[in-house]
Amino acid sequence: MGLGLASLPALGAPSGSISGRVVDADGAPIAGVCVNVESGPGAQTDGDGLYSITEIDTGSYKVTYRDCNATQHFVSQWYLGHADSGAADPVSVTDGADTPLQDLTLATGVVVQGTVTDTNGQSLSGINVNINATTGNGSPATGTQTDANGQYSSEPLPPGSYRVRFSDNGGIWAAQYWNATSSYNDAAPVLLALSDGPAHTGVDAQLSAAAKIEGTVTATDGAPLEGICVDANTPRGNGWDGLGGTSTAADGTYVLTGLPAVDVRVQFRPCNGGIYVAQWYAGQTDFNRATPIVLSAGDDRTGIDGQLETGIEVSGHVTDADGNALSGIGVSVQPIGQGNGGGSQTDGNGDYTTGALSPGDYRVQFSDHNSTPTWATQYWHTQLTWESADTLTLGSGDAPARSGVDAALTSAATISGTVTGPDGQPAANVCVNVATGTPNGVSGIGNANTANDGTYSIGGLPETTVKVQFQDCNGSGPFVDQFWNDKPDYQSADPIVLSAGDHRTGIDAQLALAGAIRGTITDADGHPLGGICAQATTESSFGGLGRSESNGHYSITLPLAGRYRVQFVDCNDTRAYAGQWWPGQATQADAHVVAVSTGEIVDNIDAALDTGATGTIAGKVANVNGVAMTDSCVIAYLPNQFAVAAPVGQDGTYLIADVPSGTYSLAFLGCSGGGDPSPTVQDPQSSTVYTGVWWHGVPLHFDQGSSGGPDPIAQGANFVTVTSGQSLTSYDWCFGCTAIAISAVVPQAASLDVAFATPGIAAGASGASAQAILVYTASCTSLTGGASGSATGSSSPLTVTGLTPGATYTCQVKATDGRVTVATSAVSQPVVLAASGDGTTSAPGAVLAFTGAGAITQLASLAFVLVASGLGLVLFARRRRARA
């Protein structure tokens, strides 16, 4: 019998193989699972769950497993048990040998199903459906398309929270998320659970006709620009969400399709760097100043053109202390104020070049982005922090390139340790912050979270003296913050002196148990409400803040014993409920006290919220000349994790919209270019820099080492209460003006003479501000039900007439320049008019401590940062990161 040549492998053909078995969670074999070598052959499991893939070349491979049955039940994964290829365990194959693999266990999943129609209920086929876990990169995701009946069914997914997006490749139908939102961050999550059964149905969509934006991008000489990225964005909180993008053709034209009927802001930017400076339509340097394009369904907006200017590239050379070139170092060039920044990375020769930047002032950061940095982060000219960094000024004479922005990096230091609770057990998810003193105050320079075993390591630190804070960042406790070594605050913390390349171990902490207030929040019908803020405060300080979960439960961590009052505010992105104070009171004055001892947990502080509309806060922010303070913003702040903010416009006005009813501190801060809030505000007419203030006139400073920004209660801030649907106006502020002091309130016959000192002008103000003609208004209000009155004039005193004999009054004086309130007095002490019209003279009112007494000389501590999140705007201390 001859040799069957067909049974032999072809000469030189690969002969390696892998084999294994696929089972479910109970160990039972699974048939019909497709097993594939990445970029190679595959096989399918048999009835015993067995598979064998042959004819594989020698090498290292990643292997994927997918349920290929007509009815799918199991979640796809990579060997061994990974959701994505990046984390998959590699499998080595040798020619002529079989590599047996461990049994692969597939988990049972849940299929997402739904139907997509147009607004008339007609089925839409070929619509993309993308399902992504809400937990970030490396998490489960899948995609599919609708069939001819508009129906879709996804692959099985593990239980969890997902966002679902519907989009049309043809651009006929507007993209949207479930449930009928255009923004990822506003999208309602789809919660998958095994209790749903094999399929979670009803994840439907009704798509509207897509809007379209068209235009042309040219250079300043009119030449068309090819390869310019055009991005559509929509406002959200203090930032924006992307809606889609495209790039220009050879003739400079572009078409943005698939857009929803929303407010769109368009940005033009070079896709791959180059000599042109990015801009926002129409001709603006930042998002907040971009011209809104409000689209309707099916809209076709033409003429949305851009004309890009050439800019200045920044280049330099990065070495170690011995002059050896360093590759892979990140370089971030960020504006001081409004405008666009740029970034780059050093090449093999240690050289870098950024994209084009507009003339202006910038700060430059150099950092090693490796997970274990070898080189310490620094700013230009070896400065340690953003606040202390030297300014790089780019002028038109620097075009087309500014070279020589170099750096010599030192070896990075590392701090590591272990954090435990009071019982000595590891404390996971504790935020560890490293801060250092600079000529401009204290700044954070590094941070990390503890792992499950309580350990942490913070690298990339420079040669300097630092202090370390341990802060419970679980949101619901249960630990009290502390500084190393077992100190309560930054000032008393033990310093750690780092040298270049130092590895300091044993920077440990044992955290004390915090107290807590807990309860459940429902609607008026008893249904649980998630995303509601619960805030506990005392008369002297902020205590803590928590958010309710989907089951309505909340917990507020309280590091200090005290007598607390609790308010509830709807902090969801879509706000539908009126705030209240416990138990069910409209004002703080009527709220009941909750006494909490150290480590004590007080339960059953519950709330049932009625529905209620959001309100607004509006006003004007200017300097003493009435010129808009456009580099400032106004923030309605609920310490320490929620705020609603608005920038100051070109006319000085601001409008904080969508403010849920509640009691807030109102902060007037620097927010140059729509960036991070700053404790200082620069006058656009001069170099004068003012410190921020609380409404109205109380100095605002950032607590050193604070995890939640400043404490307005401890700083004596005046508070603003927004009731359901209320629109508050005239919350004005003048930077550079001083306060009015009431010297006396003297009773006459049915009138009061209000004497006061006229306000001064802040040092650093110039010119016309010193000659501003102010109009004064004295207002006297009865505390006992009598008639109130006011008087206006240009000098002191003012006589307020028409008052009620025998009534008790307080008075206040305001000054305006016809455009904005520039100065205000505190309320005077009460004064009584006698029945005969002869009463008692009041003591002078306390003078409000206005800021603006000149340029500041010292900045605050850890950065106070406003961040958009899924539940609102969060204020907290963190290391300033490169914003390229």
Image (cartoon, rainbow, N blue to C red):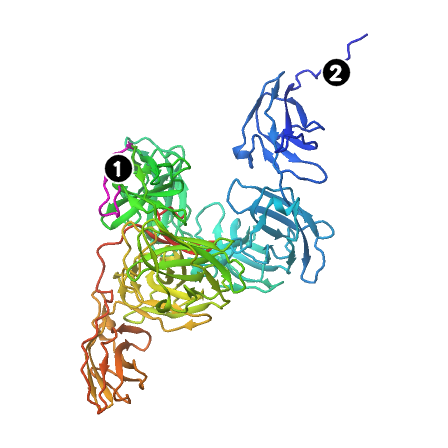
629 relative to 820, above or below:
above
Residue drawn at x 23%, y 78% is 830
Q: Is residue 491 magenta?
A: yes
Predominant secondary structure, magenta span: loop
Q: Which residue is mark 2?
A: 7
At label 2, counting other C-alpha atoms closer than 10 Å, the crowd grade (few under 14, some 14-19, many 20 or more) is few
Q: Amino acid at mark 2?
A: Ser
Residue drawn at x 31%, y 39% is 509
Q: Quadrant of residue 689?
A: bottom left
| CA–CA distance in space, label 2 to label 1 | 69 Å
Residue 766 visible to an observer of this rendering: yes
Q: Is residue 242 magenta?
A: no
At label 1, counting other C-alpha atoms closer than 10 Å, the crowd grade (few under 14, some 14-19, many 20 or more) is some
Residue 774 visible to an observer of this rendering: no
Of residues 518 and 733, which is closer to you in this image?
Answer: 518
Across and down, in percent, residue 90 comes to 54, 27
Q: Which residue is mark 1?
A: 463
Is 478 left or right of 799, judged from the image as shown?
right
The range drawn in magenta is: 486-503
Across and down, in percent, residue 444 comes to 31, 46
At mark 1, the secondary structure is: loop
